Amino acid sequence: MNIALKIIKIGNSAGVILPRDVLAHLNVQVGETLPLVTTPRGIELSAAAPDFEAQMAAAREVMLRRKRALRELAK
């Protein structure tokens, strides 16, 4: 898939509009979050892993419970 996307002004920021077929290819809908990763060739957009939110919730819980230990390890 090779599609040219136009950069548009959105408030004080800039953005691109993803065509419907790109959203379908990524299997995402309007309002969802797409991870953006920097690669040697540029950037990559991909759909988040289905269990990503559950993994992040578990990580946040551990970070809250082990805040002191994590602070010591960060020194």
Image: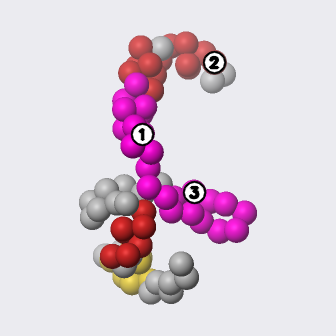
* x 44%, y 45%: residue: 49
Say which amino acid is labelled 2.
Leu
The answer to which image quadrant residue 15 occupies is bottom left
Is residue 22 in view from this perspective? Answer: yes
Sequence-first tag of 2 and 1: 1
Q: Is residue 48 left or right of residue 71?
A: left
Whole-angstrom CA distance, mark 3 to mark 2, is 27 Å
The residue pinned by badge 2 equals 73
Say which amino acid is labelled 3.
Val
Q: Nearer the viewer, mark 2 or mark 1?
A: 1
The picture places residue 70, in percent across and down from the top left corner, at 55, 19
Any magenta on residue 44? yes
The residue pinned by badge 1 equals 52
Q: Secondary structure at mark 2?
A: helix
Is residue 60 in view from this perspective? Answer: no
Any magenta on residue 22? no
| Residue numbers of the magenta segment | 36-58
In the displayed orientation, state which residue is furthest to the right.
40
The residue pinned by badge 3 equals 37
Q: Is residue 18 above or below residue 3?
A: above
Q: Nearer the viewer, mark 1 or mark 3?
A: 1
Whole-angstrom CA distance, mark 2 to mark 1, is 25 Å
